[in-house]
Image (tube, helix red, strand yellow):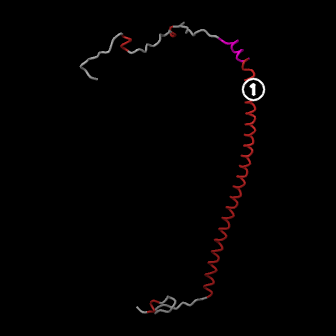
Amino acid sequence: MSITDLLPARISRPGRPVRKHRAVDEVTRLRSLLDGANALIRGLQLQVADRDAALDDTRAMQAEAEELVVKQQADIDDLTAERDQWRDEALALKARFSAQLAADANTHRITVPRMVRPVDGPEDEATAPIDVRPLWDALGIRPVTDPGRTH
């Protein structure tokens, strides 16, 4: 291995032509890079513009929503005040007329005799209450106990 093998490729080596730097080639390469960079910048500017428009739309919708919330809160406050006023009025009327209402209820009370089920048809037979005593009490027997048997 010689020292010429270690030198950069632009220096002449046996079997390879020497490439010279040409300013025109370098300018063309840099212009193409610049065109690519400009296209990338334009694309990014379009993306930023789209996002700005979307952000503006979102802010407008947020402002509308906040306005709606404020209106609804005002309605809630009005209705709450009205409800409290009606409640206070109902309590005052109840306190004022409670004795009269109780007297009227006692005067016009409805008394109903104990219910007797009509048994006009055979399908409407009256039934006796269900006997819920233990079985040995119902039959009058006692359980069998064997002193020698363990349970």
Closer to the camera in the image, 55 or 5: 55
Q: Is residue 105 above or below residue 86?
A: above
Residue 141 locus on image (x, y percent)? 34, 11
Residue 104 locus on image (x, y percent)? 72, 15
The quadrant in which residue 31 appears is bottom right
Q: Is residue 30 left or right of residue 53?
A: left
| Magenta stretch encompasses residue 46 | no
Q: Which residues are magenta?
A: 100-110
Residue wearing tag 1: 92
Q: Is residue 24 above or below residue 62?
A: below
Q: Is residue 55 left or right of residue 6?
A: right
Q: Main secondary structure of the magenta part?
A: helix
Q: Is residue 103 above or below residue 2?
A: above
* Amino acid on which the number 1 mark rests in the picture: Ala
Closer to the camera in the image, 104 or 98: 98
Closer to the camera in the image, 49 or 73: 73
Q: Residue at x 63, y 84 (%)?
A: 27
Q: Is residue 15 above or below residue 35?
A: below
Q: Quadrant of the N terminus?
A: bottom left
What element does badge 1 sit on? helix
Q: Residue at x 39, y 15 (%)?
A: 134
